[in-house]
Image (cartoon, rainbow, N blue to C red):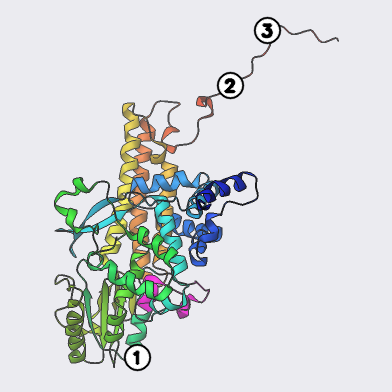
Amino acid sequence: MRGTGHLEPLRGLALRQMGLVHRQDPQDVLSKLRRAVHKSSNLEDAWRVIYRNGKFSNSEDVRQAIERFSEDPAANLRSIQRRLSRGTFTFGQARGAPIQKRDGRGKPTGKIRPIVISSLEARIVQRAILNVLVEIPALKPYVNTPHSFGGLRKAQTDDRAKGDGISAVPAAIKAVLDGIGRGAGWVAAADITGFFTKVPKSTVMGIIRGAIKDDDLMALLEAAISVELANLSELRKFADQFPIEDIGVAQGNSLSPLLGNILLAAFDNAMNEGDCRCIRYIDDFVILAPTRKAADARLRKARRLLEEFDMELAPEKSSKQAHEVSKGFEFLGIEISAGFVRPAKRARTKFISSIDAQLDASKNAITGLRHGHKLDPKLALIATLKRIDGMIDGWGKHYWFCNDRHLFQTVDEKVRLAIGAYLGAYADTRSRLPEGKAHLPLGLTNLGEMQRSPFIYPKTAKQAPS
C-alpha cells in the first residue's frame, strides 16, 4: 500500500485555501533583534540622523535624494519597513567617490579617500542596524569606551560645559583637555593610513557573531557592510582601494566606525596602560604623557600594535617625536594652545572660502540679468543671504566648545566685509536694470508674472432693479 506522505503538500494547500491554516507571517520567524531593526521608532530615528548629516552634503545627488525622501518620509519609511519585515529589502549597488587628499597647505597629495556612497534607503537601514547593535550588552564595551570617540553618538544633556553627554569631536577634545589637566606635559599626534581599507571584515564579524549569537541580525549586517560598486570601471587606478573584498569596510557607512572600534579595542586598552593617555577618533589619535621619553615610547608601541593588522602611521600627518603641550598642537581640526581652544587655521580659511564661493556665484548670476540671462531663484539675493546665515549658524554651532571669542569676532568681520562687497555689486546691478526689472535680483515673487487660471466675467449681465 502506498504511503500518504506525497499527499501532504496538497492537503496543506487545501487547508490554507479553506482558511483552516494561516500562512506564516515572515516577521514571526525573525529574531527579536532582527525585528528591532525595522521597528517604526528605530527607522524614524535613523532617518533623522541621515537627514541631519546629509541635507548639507557636498554631493548634489545626496542632497536631492534627501529632498525627495522628505516629501513623504512616513510613506517612504513604511515601504522600507515592509520590505525588511518580508525579507525583500536589498541594499543595492553603491558608488565609489575617490576624494583627493590634501596636505596641511591644502595641496593635493596624489592619494585619495575612498568614500562609498550608498543609496539613501541603504544608509537609513545601516543606521537602524547600528542603533540596535550599540544597545546589545555584549557590544557596549566597544561603544562606551573612554578611549575612542569617532562615529558613535551619545545621548545629549544640557550640561555640555561639564562635558556630560557630549560625543564625537567635542568629547574627544574634552578628553584631551582632561589629560592635560591631569598633568600631561608632552604630546604626539598620529594618523593611521587608509584605516577603513585595512579593516578585515571576517575578523570583526566573528567577534560580533560571538557576542550577539543571532543569525538573523548577522545576515542583515553582512549584507549591510558588503560593497558592490556600480561605477567600478570608472574608478580606474583607484578601484583597488575600495573595500569590495574581505579586507576593508566602507568609509561612509555608519556601521564602519563601530567595526573599527571593535577591531582596535585591544589597541586602545594597551595604549592607555600606565601613565599615558591615548585618545583616538577613528584613524586619528593623540598620545599624552608626563615625559617626552614616555610619549615617544608609546608612539613606537602604537606602530608595533598596528603592524598586526597591516596598518601603519601616515608619515606626513604623524609626529616623529613628542613635543611639549605648551607649544600647542592640532587635533581633529582644533588648535589647542596656551589656554585657547579654537578652530584650526585651515578650518577658518575653508569656511571663509565657502562663504566667498556662495556670494560670488550669486553675484555672477545677478550680474547676468544685465545681459538678459534668467536668474536661478537659489542665487537671488534673499535666498543667498538666508543660505549664508545658515552656514554661519551651522559653523558656529559646530565649534560651540571653543573658547576664543576674539577669533570668532574676527571671522564675523571677514564675513561682514564679504557681504558688504556683495551688496555693493547687487546695488550696482540693480541701478543698471530697466524700470520694472529692479526687483529681480531680490528673488521676490512677482505677482504680475504668476501663472493664473482666472474666472471669466460674463459678457452680459442683467441690470439690477433700482
Helix, strand or loop at disc 1? loop
The local crowd at label 1, few if under 14, some if 14 to 19, many if 20 or more residues have their Cα within 10 Å, is: few
Judge depth for marks 3 and 1 and give the one in front: 1
Q: Which label is found at residue 449?
A: none
Tell me the kind of residue under disc 2.
Ser
Q: Where is residue 108 drawn, in percent x and y?
A: 16, 57
Question: In the drawing, does residue 325 fall left or right of residue 175?
Answer: left
Q: CA distance from mark 1 to mark 2?
A: 73 Å
Question: In the drawing, does residue 138 fall left or right of residue 315?
Answer: right
Residue at the image point whose x is 38% and y is 81% from the top: 146
Q: Which label is found at residue 453?
A: 2
* Residue 143 in view in this figure: no
Q: Where is residue 362 drawn, in percent x and y?
A: 35, 41
Up/down of 345 relative to 460, above or below: below
Residue at the image point whose x is 33% and y is 69% from the top: 205
> Total number of numbered labels?
3
Q: Which label is found at residue 459?
A: 3
Helix, strand or loop at disc 2? loop
The local crowd at label 2, few if under 14, some if 14 to 19, many if 20 or more residues have their Cα within 10 Å, is: few
